[in-house]
Image: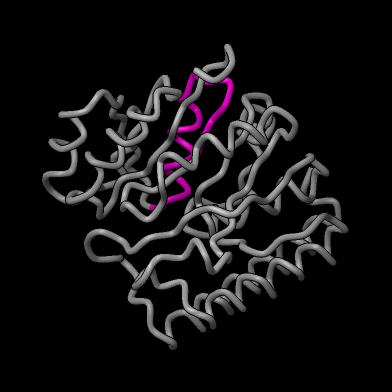
Amino acid sequence: MWKGKTVSVVISSYRERNSIREVIDGYFATGVVDEVIAVDNNAEAGSNGEIQQTRARLITEERQGQGFGLRAGMREAKGQYVILSEGDGTYDPYDISKFLAYGEDFPVVLGTRTNTSLIGPDSGMFLLRRIADELEGRLIEMLFFTNRLTDIGCTYKLLRREVVERLDTKWQTGDSHFITEVTLQVAARKILFVEIPVAFKKRIGVSSVTENFFNITKWGVKLLVFILSFWVRWISGGIR
């Protein structure tokens, strides 16, 4: 609990068997988290056993995709503040205090992994990736006339309960584009938000996406198309 308000953390589980228990325990260790919703999104064998050794509540989402997993977890979360995170050890549970502090004044708080002083070795957040994130963030700024954005791919976010409920039926995607869609939906609906720097560490285990130049470039192009198509739907009245 944070200053009398309940706090939920939502994590979608897929390939985090070797890290998810430590991550969940880390959030409870902060002393401010009331519940962790861990979503089995067709997770690798052994993941649920790790989760069941924690205080987290385990639910299942069979539709494959990080977005579907997080959406299911957000619907189940009871907290007045809902935090989205990862189970792979890349984010620091203790950064949650920064989100909650800003959450007192902003309905949405977005993390950014682009501050070089907070980027750990071998985290995969190399220069090209940071540049791509910042350029596409600037594009969203211009298209939606919103405030500064430097990272459109950071899962670590806070949404107040009223924002979660407002957006529950508005989501357009269930894959990993969902992380960017959260930012787009917030910007399109003129919901007040702020972006804050967070620590970003090396992932524990193997990613489902190989982070090399080719894949990062391909991913950046896909996100660009997604942003522009969302904007076209928005200006044509398709996003309400």
Q: Which residue is rendered at x = 49% and y = 61% of the image?
A: 118
Image quarter in which the C terminus is found: top right
- In the rendered structure, the answer to whether residue 113 lies left or right of residue 62 reads right
What x and y, as percent, mark residue 5?
57, 16
The number of numbered badges drawn on the structure is 0
Q: Quadrant of residue 103?
A: top right
What x and y, as percent, mark residue 171?
61, 44
Q: Quadrant of residue 160?
A: top right
Residue 199, relative to residue 121: is it above or below? above
Q: Which residue is rendered at x = 44% and y = 87% of the image?
A: 213
Q: Which residue is rendered at x = 28% and y = 40% of the image?
A: 40
What x and y, as percent, mark residue 189?
80, 43
Q: Quick check: is 32 in the magenta stretch? A: no
Residue 179, relative to residue 129: is it above or below? above
Residue at the bottom extreme of this rendering: 214
Residue 151, relative to residue 63: is it above or below? below
- In the rendered structure, the answer to whether residue 121 lies left or right of residue 138 reads left
Question: Nearest the camera: 220 or 123?
Answer: 123
Q: Which residue is rendered at x = 77% and y = 50% of the image?
A: 187
Residue at the top extreme of this rendering: 4
Question: Nearest the camera: 93 or 6?
Answer: 93
Residue 55, relative to residue 140: is it above or below? above
* Boundaries of the magenta span: 65-83
